[in-house]
Image (cartoon, coloured by chain):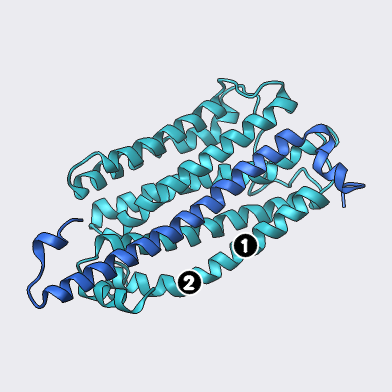
Chain colours: A blue, B cyan
């Protein structure tokens, strides 16, 4: 441990604003990319399922005008 | 050999193989980054000149590596797409750009806040900093060009050309600290030289660099899969898949 106490650790020897802001921005962007990628996947699968259901309702007739929205 | 290459270009095959690879890269990324962060922030000794502000190195250097590596990967993918018309390469290139921009931003931001206590300024128009800023704008350019066309194919080709041309900025970034007088310190890690740091300082840095690379691979696999679902949504196998996934 390079610090004597937890307070020391958070203070970073007076460099707290620099160290913690660099770390915060990094964490935000890394976690944000994961959250975004997961949401993107969920959304895409939802869209696919919705279209499958819609086309099944219309029957064997491919619902061109409804489905060609992407 | 040809059979293998043909498999590689099939989105269906990629979708299946990446599903198996992905968890390993996520696990490696999480483990390496968590251990590297705890070690680097709390256990590595403070620098005798810079004190604790040097701990910024543990996000700054990995992000700067990735910023450049991702651009090179994107340019390679662009060549593969342009020469062999392999769609999956273009999908990978498309999803790499935003992460590359994010990494460049992290490198610039962490460098700026590191510069305040170390150099007394957060920004200098010197060669290393300026060429990194240009890299950020190149990423923005690639992202914007891709979306600027009515047809996806035109966007893909325009973005590929910019990625291939823009890659000349990478050696400029790398050698900027040698070619021009600059405030920026020279490379921390070199292939041949010894590391001018005690092990307790460079080991967490190595973990962070490897962790960031694993993160890049994991996220690229994940988002390329998303891109397959988006672009191949009319294909039978994707539609069958949607029934089984949730």
The residue indicated by pointer 2 is B21
Task: Farthest residue to the left: give it.
Answer: A61
Does any portion of residue B146 appear in the rendered image?
yes
Tell me the chain of label 2.
B
For the residues marked 2 and 1, what is the alpha-carbon distance in whole angstroms? 15 Å
Residue at position x 57%, y 42% in the image: B64
Residue at position x 58%, y 38% in the image: B107
Crowding near the residue tagged with mark 1, few <14, some 14–19, many ≥20 C-alpha atoms within 10 Å: some
The residue indicated by pointer 1 is B30
Question: Left of A64 or right of it: where is B55?
Answer: right
- Quarter occupied by the N terminus of chain B: bottom left
Task: Farthest residue to the right: give it.
Answer: A4
**Where B8 sits versus A18, above or below?**
below
Residue at position x 47%, y 58% in the image: B219
Q: How many marks?
A: 2
| Callout 2 touching callout 1 (CB < 8 Å) | no
Question: Left of A1 or right of it: where is A32?
Answer: left
Q: Mark 2 or 1 closer to N-term?
A: 2
Q: Position of residue B170 (x, y in %)?
A: 47, 38
Q: Position of residue B135 (x, y in %)?
A: 45, 35
Tell me the chain of label 1.
B
Q: Could you say whether the residue bearing mark 1 is in a helix, strand or loop?
A: helix
Q: Position of residue B69 (x, y in %)?
A: 49, 48
**Where B193 sits versus B117, above or below?**
below
């Amino acid at each position: 441990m390079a610090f004597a106490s937890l307070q020391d650790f958070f203070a970073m020897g007076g460099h707290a604003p620099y160290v913690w802001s660099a770390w915060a921005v990094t964490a935000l962007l890394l976690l944000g990319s994961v959250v975004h990628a997961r949401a993107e996947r969920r959304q895409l699968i939802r869209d696919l399922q919705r279209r499958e259901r819609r086309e099944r309702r219309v029957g064997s007739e491919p619902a061109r005008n409804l489905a060609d929205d992407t | 050999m040809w059979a293998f290459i043909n498999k590689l270009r099939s989105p269906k095959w990629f979708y299946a193989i990446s599903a198996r690879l992905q968890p390993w890269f996520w696990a490696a990324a999480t483990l390496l980054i968590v251990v590297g962060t705890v070690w680097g922030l709390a256990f590595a000794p403070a620098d005798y000149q810079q004190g604790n502000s040097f701990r910024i190195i543990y996000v700054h250097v990995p992000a700067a590596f990735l910023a450049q590596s991702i651009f090179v990967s994107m340019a390679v993918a662009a060549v593969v797409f342009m020469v062999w018309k392999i769609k999956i390469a273009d999908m990978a290139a498309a999803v790499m750009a935003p992460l590359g921009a994010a990494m460049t931003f992290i490198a610039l931001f962490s460098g700026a806040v590191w510069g305040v206590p170390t150099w007394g300024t957060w920004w200098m128009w010197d060669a290393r900093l300026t060429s990194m800023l240009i890299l950020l704008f190149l990423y923005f350019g690639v992202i914007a060009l891709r979306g600027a066309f009515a047809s996806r194919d035109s966007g893909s080709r325009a973005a590929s050309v910019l990625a291939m041309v823009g890659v000349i900025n990478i050696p400029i970034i790398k050698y900027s600290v040698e070619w021009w007088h600059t405030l920026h310190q020279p490379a921390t890690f070199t292939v041949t030289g010894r590391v001018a740091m005690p092990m307790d300082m460079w080991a967490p840095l190595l973990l962070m660099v490897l962790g960031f690379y694993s993160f890049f691979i994991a996220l690229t696999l994940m988002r390329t899969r998303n891109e397959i679902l988006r672009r191949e949504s009319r294909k039978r196998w994707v539609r069958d898949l949607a029934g089984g996934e949730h």
